[in-house]
Amino acid sequence: MDWVTRVIYLHIPLNLIILETGHATEKDTRVLGATAPGDIIIGGIFPIHEDVDKENNSFAPQLQPCIRFEERSLVRVLAMINAIEIVNKSPLLADVNITLGYRIMDSCSDVSTALKATADFTQRADCYIRSNTFGQPVMAVVGASSSETSIAIARQLSLKMIPQISYSSTAAILSDKSRFPSFMRTIPNDEHQTAAMVSLLSTYGWNWVGIVTTDGNYGQSALDNFVSQASEKGICVAFKSILPQSVTSEDVCSAIMQTARAICKNPKVQVIVSFAKPTHMMYLYQELKNQTLTAGQSMKTMRRVWLASDNWSYSSFVKGNITLEDIGHILGFTFKNGDLSSFSEYLSRLEAAGHDYIRNNTFMQEFYMQLKASNDSGETELVSKAVKRLREHTYAGTIFSVEMAVSAIAQAVASICRNRDCKTPGKVQPWEVLKALWMEEFKLRKKSYKFDSRGDINLGYDVTMWRSDGGNIHVHNVVAEYHPHNNNFTRTNHSSTQQLQDLKHIISKCSSSCVPGQFKKTAEGQHTCCYECINCTANYYSNNTDMDQCLSCDTNTEWSTDGSSSCIPKALLYFSWQDGFAVVLLTFSALGIFLALLVSALFLHRRDTPVVKAAGGPLSQVILFSLVISDISAMLFVGRPNSFQCKARQVLFGISFTLCVSCILVKTLQILLAFQVDPETQEVLRRLYQPYLIVSICVAVQAATCVCWLVLKSPFNHVIRHPTTLLEDCHEGSYLAFGLMLGYIAVLALVCFICAFKGRKLPQQYNEAKFITFSMLLYLISWLLFVPVYVTTSTVYLPAVEMVVILISNYGILSCHFFPKCYIILLKKEHNTKSAFRKNLYEYSSKTTDSVSVSVVTNCRDGTSCTSLHRGSIKHCLRRSTSI
């Protein structure tokens, strides 16, 4: 109890000093703190108090009383002291025979107070240089905590180029070395923290968020960085709440109420990003609870996912009297953790030593005084409670950052003092320490670190997820690590995977996701995250969620219906071999070839019979050959078209069928010459009648047409694009040439038809003119029907139409010209004799009304079989080889 009494007596003059400073001049102003002697002095600025009492409106310069003691900041002070004591005992400083001392001041979370502490550092340097008095100068400063304070004191320290290393100031502006040349920090700046937050939001698809931050440089810097990075990822900010920097400001209550009201009015905002202070968050949670209960709603309605910045991510006291289940999920971003074993041992030594550790540390004195005032305990019990409270506020990330700052300064000083005597004050200048910090690496627990070109050390972040264990909240539960170099997260263990999986069920969007097949349509003036989903139109698609516009299908090869998520390849159509209709037509083509060959064999076998001779003799073989080629050409209309097929099928048909019709024309002319031409004229025409020459000329004209067609503009395979299909077909190249080819055959067929029509009343064995008439009529009708179908139709069965017409023409000739003769040869053999033919001619001549007599005379002098036609007294002979 004796030491407690002494503490109380120490506290009385302490309060008197604080009160007395209100009446002192600026020159006499002193800020109490923690000190220790050494060859090189390191300054420290920590927010031991959360604010200052600004009720005193005196015009005289004075130190305003600090209020609201911060136990977590005291832990940071002790971490710095422990780190200095460790390096003093290390070989690093023992080898150069120096020790480090410290002078630690309280900023009271107030810029003006911090500036006065900084002025104390710089004034000591000036006084020592001028008169070698007023203590040793400060070679480097550790701190401050908040960016607002660091920015202010960095400008002042830069005047003397005193190096400043912060352990928690993260504002991005401090990385600008043109403005803050002596500022450094052992943590990454806010650009990396906000990037990590944006990356996490993007990972879970949360694009509709709210932001709570504080006024001032830190809050505004964090807000600007976050909004800029979030917009690049398509994340929208539903509302922004900026709270006063001071937690005791008169505007805090109204700002907290407005923030809570904004959260309640935006139920779709399920994720809140907060850069606020811990006390602000405690007030906000309490106000949310009050407004929720006042509205008669369940506490579950205030549940959110809270992304906590390093400013409050480890401050479990923010929950107040609200459970974590009511608050929701808290994901905190903390600095990389280090080894706490050394600091834990220090606290154990502190507990064992009792009051001996507070002689030169007024912060510890005040801490013990507060504990004594609230707990009527003995000396040993009070010390244990104090250490226990300190352990509760021990956060590995911050402790590690402070230790890095001390280690960096210690090794920079050691590198300077290896070549000079540093025990004499004034031998080392702050700017030399700054240069060594920039140039050299330093080690901490066997790992090397170095400040980058902007004076930062960027090790990334640990992502913690608060969890409740009964009534206790654990905020050190690291679930993932953020790596800034590749902007990704790695999970730390299996249990964290399950915790992070639970977050996937949370939706924080202004509008529901547009499914594939839709696109987002944003109304003018609205956030891009607030939209309606519109189906993609035909031939457009979207293959992902929340697409800003539909993508166009390649209409040459693809198509899609309304609301499609992909393009459908257009079906390639052609008259396929597998098509049932094609199989039927191919069967008929093959049958036609077979029948033509069969008839040809029969006619060759019976070539000396009158029926075969009457059918044309050798010309009948030519006709049958042309029908075989024509049937083969019909087969070329089936299958996927190619260049050769397109060229061959029309030309092959044109020439072969021209050959067929030419032969029929010769037969027709032969019949007319024999039966229906005046004898005088017949004698002249018989001399001009040259069957093979006529056939050759007719075929040559068609062949010339086809050659010109192939040379000038030949047929080719092409694709006809329909909305949903691709029709591969043959383009005729020149429709004029195609028309001339068919027209030429039609002219020959028409001539045959006219000539055959005139001889339709010949005797039974010579009635081929009737069949020629019918076959040519069938040909002309079928092709006349083909022309309009061909011109107006573009379907897969268009080749089949032409194929049908060709087969009709071929079968028409085969049926009319050859099948009747085959019938006589095979089944009516008695009609296939010379006597039967003579009898038929005789019967025909007796029926003629113009007294035409016909007689057949054999054994003519020239060895021919003569046929006499009597019109008056005219008589002539036809050669045996001439068939009628």
Image: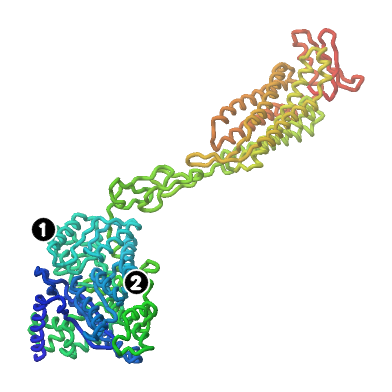
| Viewer-nearest residue: 470 or 666 | 470
Q: Residue furthest front?
A: 130
| Viewer-nearest residue: 270 or 745 | 270
- Cβ atoms under marks 1 and 2 closer than 8 Å: no
Pointer 1 residue: 294
For the residues labelled 1 and 2, the Cα–Cα distance comes to 42 Å
* Place of residue 538 in the rendered image (x, y in percent of width and height, measured from the top left): 42, 42
Q: Residue at x 12, y 85 (%)?
A: 382
Tell me which label, 1 or 2, sits earlier in the chain.
1
Quadrant of image for the N terminus: bottom left
Q: Is residue 649 left or right of residue 545?
A: right
Give the class, few, some or many, for how many residues have Cα within 10 Å of label 1's Cα (few <14, many ≥20): few
Q: Residue at x 14, y 57 (%)?
A: 297
Q: Residue at x 90, y 19 (%)?
A: 860
| Viewer-nearest residue: 628 or 195 | 195
Quadrant of image for the C terminus: top right
**Disc 2, SS:** loop
